[in-house]
Image: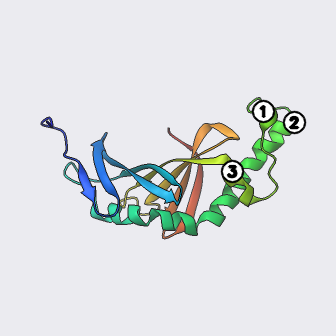
Amino acid sequence: MLGFFESKPFTDSRLGTFERRRGQWVGAAALTSHERVELRVAGDRKAPDAESLRLAADAPAQYASARAAIARELFEHYEPYHDAWRRDELEMLGDEFPELSEPDEVWAHVSVERIDVDARRLASPIEVRLRVVWDEEHTLGVLLRDAELVELNGSMAP
């Protein structure tokens, strides 16, 4: 039985069932063919926002389209950490720090934490939050709009 202030679950024909938690609609999405991650979609108490749902359904394709640009940005993010590790200025990861020589190699060291979609954020309505092994202290935010990388934010709140 739902309490007075609780929302009923919402089911979308493309994305499945969402539950409202902490002001967002939370479900799951397949970002790649083998990886399902948490999906958070903006909306009101009754349902997710229709435009945000449309963008959420398109998020995997947008992420795939921006993948090469994301890899380049992640590699640029990696390089200073690698340099610091080689100078013994970085205590994390010990001897297991990845040795990468090109952007496409980053993917073996990246995991997706979740996807946030809010159509009201016109500049970057899709945000994919990533974790990388070389930066254990931060969640990185891949901000997307129209299947293009807007920004790799190196320090997102958890």
| Residue 91 screen position, x and y as percent | 77, 29
* Depth check, front residue: 151 or 108: 108
Judged left or right of residue 117, residue 149 is right
Q: Do the residues labelled 2 and 3 touch (CB within 8 Å)?
A: no
Element at badge 2? loop
Q: Name the residue under label 1.
A: 90
> How far apart, in angstroms, are the residues tagged by discs 2 and 3?
24 Å
Give above or below for 47 relative to 123.
above
Disc 1 + disc 2, Cβ < 8 Å: yes
Q: Which amino acid does label 2 sit on?
A: Arg
Residue for point 61% across, 64% down: 67
**Residue 93 shown left or right of residue 157 in the figure:** right
Instruction: Please tell me whether mark 1 sits on a helix, a strand or a loop.
Output: loop
Image vertical order of residue 107 relative to residue 7, above or below: below
Residue at 51% across, 62% down: 144
Indicate the amino acid at tag 1: Leu
Inspect the image, locate mark 3, and give the three-letter code of the amino acid beneath it: Ala
Q: Coloring scheme of the render? A: rainbow
Q: Where is residue 42 in the image (x, y as percent from the top left)?
A: 33, 53
In this view, the mark in front (2 or 3): 3
Residue 146 in picture, x, y percent from top left: 48, 70
Residue located beneath label 2 in the image: 87
Q: Is mark 3 on a helix, strand or loop?
A: helix
Viewer-side residue, 29 vs 126:
29
Crowd class of label 2 (few under 14; some 14 to 19; many from 20; radius 10 Å): few
CA gap between label 1 and label 3 equals: 21 Å
Circle 3 sits on which residue?
108
